[in-house]
Image: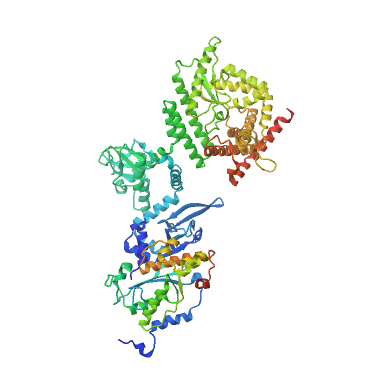
């Protein structure tokens, strides 16, 4: 009897793996005992930990989400849409690993598991396909995560990537071997070089390619020995490209053939010599402005313009890192390195423009938030210059030289995107371009005479970090400060009082305190109300404990937690809260394309508000510690 | 030619069996009741003159359509109207294996059993089937019948019902319900679409799944 419906299902199934590997009549027979199921939105197809049904499913129309509990919530691990197969029992387990719920109105075909398994057992291609896809999708969490990330990246950056017609960068050293190698040797070679793909060649002409996937397949098939020849398992013929292939083109070829590596030959055909290999990873790198690539770009820059360009790219990278919710401490480290490289290279360029070499050794310092390495966005430049003592007769000349250098530096940094400091706290200001002994006496004055102005300045100048130049100078200065502070606690008390000036940011009624006047009326000033009080507190406490070399607020709190065990938990909370606030500010800053300092509370979600509020408790507690320790009410 | 039961006024055993099943049948909950979505292709639209060329049907229970529970018959007919050929695509001497009307009746009755018949504008299909049964001196179909076109009307707001007096065609219905159109104008294909339409409409009629029998028929 003719069965039109079974034929229709067959027509649908045959487009998709693994059904396309099946014989027509086998498949039609299965289709004849198929069921068509309709699912309403949110209807459950099967539940996790319940025994397998007698059928497995293929989505015909609509979509089904698979979820698995993770940390008390159900995490969606996959969304199956048309042609995707789900609920198939591959391993020996007898209950479902995930819960399947219709994402929308869905029609699924239910196929009998038993009849299908019988066929797959006798069909190697299908069982291999099932095992490998099962293994690569679910058993190997790395690949799942990785593929997910790739997908997300393309989504997010569509606008920037769509025009990518730059020439693709590929690896020029190609690890090769000949087809008569055993798979074991090939695998060892791949392991040794830490590569996922081995090019099989004859006389430097590509004839095949062996990737992790082929090795996995051959293992899954069970029909192999260590001596099996590469020739029998490699993919051949190979897909090749020309050396001038552009990124988009290469990506399309990879997608079209469903492969992960493209061999680059002289003229793009397999008949010519291999010149390189291009992997999916290379494409991701070229799309993603990887930190390594950026570092190279910064180091190679010969003009300020290049640096600016590189730094713009770094901001794109920063945004993606934040979107991906990487730990902020890691982001800070990566960008700290990049920023170091940026300033270093800017200094190199500035020095090259000077007629003479520096007369004495010097050091370029970053101050304030940049000195603490907490600044991820473009801000004002706060910097200073310190140079070695010289004889009194040369002093004027030396100062002139360094002022000129500082001027060039400030101009260049401005070009890159860092505004001039409105308070003129820059190395080009003669007040902050000083010799070591001048700086020492300057710090001594700040420490001994705590006028309100001096306290404000010390808040910025105590957080200095060497960006370029002579480390010895900085160490001498730090030692001097350390010694002075030992005998003079009065500055710390005043700094503590200053740190307590900013009220806890939540009022009695647990409302946010917002700005009452000015341009940012009714906005919440996250820097002034939350971030600055925390870093002020960290500075006073760290200086009080003699922690002079750690500048980063989060790290200061962590160091304090080690030294001051009774308050350990509090300091750890502070460190955490600070990182959370900074991340919040940076994200806001990117979203609002400003410094992220002022936050419109109405734009926040309830959970964001709660998160923000939660960060304020450690602040209140640490202010309490300051008050008790430095008896600030008596000043 | 004369059939033996014409003289004795007796029905053949398969009809007796079909008929007596209804007396025994008990009403089950809706989710366990067997429905049969049915469609016929005919030589034309004249009930008296035109004949059935093909019968297609699929069975469904709850929201599951079982392909194994389906019927697809091609009937050999002497009457043939070439005007309708472009619609159903069944040629008088086509390659498909055809069976005689008497055989088709037997198979259809055995297949349907006491199931509730669903169809789109099912009145016509029932009428031609009854006409066919009459030609063979049998009684009328005894199954309960649901028409998806009237069922669909229930989904509409009373204000809009006025404007759709003629009812929807199966094409319009599938579009409104987002049912993929395949094998339109083959009996089985249309039966499949009707089955999906029935599931979707009954889901929408009662979102909480508490639909009762009587609500389907009133």
Q: In this view, does A356 lie to the left or right of A523?
A: left
Q: Quadrant of the N terminus of chain A?
A: bottom left
Furthest residue to the top? A393
Q: In this view, does A339 lie to the left or right of B56?
A: right
Q: Can you give x and y, in whole percent of width and height, for residue A87 in the image? A: 45, 58
Q: Which residue is drawn at 45% across and 23% down?
A: A348
| Residue A489 appears in the figure | no
Q: Can you give x and y, in whole percent of width and height, for residue A430 in the image? A: 56, 18
- Up/down of B23 relative to A555, above or below: below
Q: Can you give x and y, in whole percent of width and height, for residue B97 in the image? A: 29, 72
- Please name whichever residue, A4 or A321, is drawn nearer the observer in this view of the structure: A4
Furthest residue to the right? A634
Q: Residue at x 53, y 68 (%)?
A: B211
- Please name whichever residue, A63 or A51, is drawn nearer the observer in this view of the structure: A63
- Please name whichever residue, B54 or A280, is drawn nearer the observer in this view of the structure: B54
Q: Quadrant of the C terminus of chain A?
A: top right
Q: Can you give x and y, in whole percent of width and height, for residue A517 in the image? A: 64, 35
Furthest residue to the front? B163
């Amino acid at each position: 009897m003719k069965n039109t419906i079974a034929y229709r299902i067959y027509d649908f199934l045959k487009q998709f793996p693994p059904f396309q590997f099946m014989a027509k009549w086998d498949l039609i027979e299965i289709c004849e005992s198929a069921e068509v199921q309709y699912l309403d939105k949110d209807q459950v197809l099967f539940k996790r930990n319940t025994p397998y049904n007698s059928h497995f499913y293929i989505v015909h129309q609509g979509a089904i989400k698979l979820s698995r509990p993770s940390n008390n919530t159900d995490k969606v691990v996959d969304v199956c849409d048309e042609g995707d197969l789900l609920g198939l029992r591959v391993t020996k387990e007898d209950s479902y690993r995930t819960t399947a719920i219709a994402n929308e109105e869905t029609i699924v075909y239910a196929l009998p598991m038993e009849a299908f398994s019988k066929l797959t057992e006798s069909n190697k291609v299908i069982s291999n396909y099932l095992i490998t896809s099962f293994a690569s999708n679910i058993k190997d969490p790395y690949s799942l995560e990785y593929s997910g990330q790739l997908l997300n990246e393309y989504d997010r950056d569509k606008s920037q990537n769509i025009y990518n017609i730059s020439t693709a960068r590929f690896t020029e050293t190609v690890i090769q071997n000949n087809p008569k190698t055993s798979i074991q040797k090939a695998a060892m070679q791949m392991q040794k070089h830490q590569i996922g793909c081995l090019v099989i060649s004859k006389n430097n002409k590509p004839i095949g390619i062996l990737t992790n996937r082929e090795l996995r397949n051959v293992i899954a098939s069970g029909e192999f020995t260590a001596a099996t020849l590469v020739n029998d398992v490699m993919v051949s013929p190979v897909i090749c490209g020309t050396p001038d292939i552009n990124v988009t083109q290469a990506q399309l070829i990879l997608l079209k053939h469903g492969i992960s590596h493209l061999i680059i030959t002289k003229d793009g055909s397999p008949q010519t010599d291999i010149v390189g290999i291009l992997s999916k990873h290379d494409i991701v790198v070229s799309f993603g402005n990887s930190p390594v690539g950026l570092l190279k770009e910064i180091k190679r820059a010969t003009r300020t313009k290049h640096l600016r360009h590189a730094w713009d790219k770094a901001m794109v990278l920063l945004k993606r890192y934040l979107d991906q919710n990487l730990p902020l401490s890691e982001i800070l480290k990566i960008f700290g390195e990049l920023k170091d490289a940026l300033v270093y290279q800017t200094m190199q360029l500035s020095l090259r423009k000077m007629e003479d070499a520096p007369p004495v050794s010097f050091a370029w310092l970053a101050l304030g938030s940049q000195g603490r390495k907490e600044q991820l966005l473009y801000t004002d430049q706060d910097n200073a210059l310190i140079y070695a003592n010289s004889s009194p007769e040369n002093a004027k000349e030396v100062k002139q030289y360094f002022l000129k250098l500082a001027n060039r530096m400030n101009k260049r940094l401005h070009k890159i995107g860092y505004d001039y400091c409105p308070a003129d706290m820059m190395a080009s200001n003669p007040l902050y371009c000083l010799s070591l002994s001048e700086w020492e006496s300057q710090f001594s004055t700040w420490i001994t005479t705590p006028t309100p102005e001096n306290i404000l300045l010390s808040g910025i100048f105590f957080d200095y970090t060497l960006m370029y130049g002579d480390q010895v100078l900085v160490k001498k200065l730090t030692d001097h400060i350390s010694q002075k502070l030992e005998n003079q606690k009065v500055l710390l008390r005043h700094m503590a009082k200053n740190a307590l000036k900013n009220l806890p940011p939540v009022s009695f009624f647990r409302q946010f305190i917002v700005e009452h006047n000015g341009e940012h009326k009714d906005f919440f000033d996250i820097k002034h109300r939350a971030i600055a009080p925390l870093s002020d507190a960290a500075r006073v406490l760290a200086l009080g404990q003699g922690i002079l070399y750690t500048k980063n607020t989060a790290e200061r709190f962590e160091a304090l937690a080690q030294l001051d065990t009774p308050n350990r938990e509090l300091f750890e909370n502070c460190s955490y809260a600070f990182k959370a606030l900074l991340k919040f500010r940076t994200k806001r800053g990117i979203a609002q394309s400003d410094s992220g300092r002022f936050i419109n509370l109405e734009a926040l979600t309830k959970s964001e508000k709660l998160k923000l509020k939660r960060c304020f408790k450690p602040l209140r507690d640490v202010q309490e510690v300051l008050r008790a320790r430095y008896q600030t009410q008596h000043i | 030619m004369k059939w033996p039961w014409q003289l004795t006024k007796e029905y053949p055993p398969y009809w007796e069996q079909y008929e007596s099943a209804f007396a025994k049948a008990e009403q089950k909950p809706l989710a366990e009741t067997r429905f049969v979505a049915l469609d016929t292709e005919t030589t034309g639209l004249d009930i008296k003159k035109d004949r059935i060329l093909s019968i297609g049907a699929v069975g469904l229970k709850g929201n599951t359509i079982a392909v194994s529970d389906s019927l697809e018959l091609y009937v050999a007919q002497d009457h043939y109207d070439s005007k309708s050929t472009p619609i159903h695509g069944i040629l008088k001497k086509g390659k498909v294996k055809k069976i005689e009307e008497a055989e088709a009746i037997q198979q259809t009755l055995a297949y349907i059993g006491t199931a509730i018949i669903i169809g789109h504008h099912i009145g016509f299909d029932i009428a031609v089937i009854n006409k066919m049964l009459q030609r063979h001196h049998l009684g009328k179909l005894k199954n309960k019948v649901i028409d998806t076109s009237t069922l669909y009307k229930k989904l509409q707001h009373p204000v809009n019902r006025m404007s759709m007096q003629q009812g929807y065609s199966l094409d319009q219905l599938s579009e409104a319900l987002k049912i993929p159109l395949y094998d339109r104008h083959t009996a089985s294909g249309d039966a499949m679409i009707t089955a999906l339409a029935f599931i979707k409409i009954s889901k929408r009629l009662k979102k909480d799944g508490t639909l009762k029998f009587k609500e389907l028929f009133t």
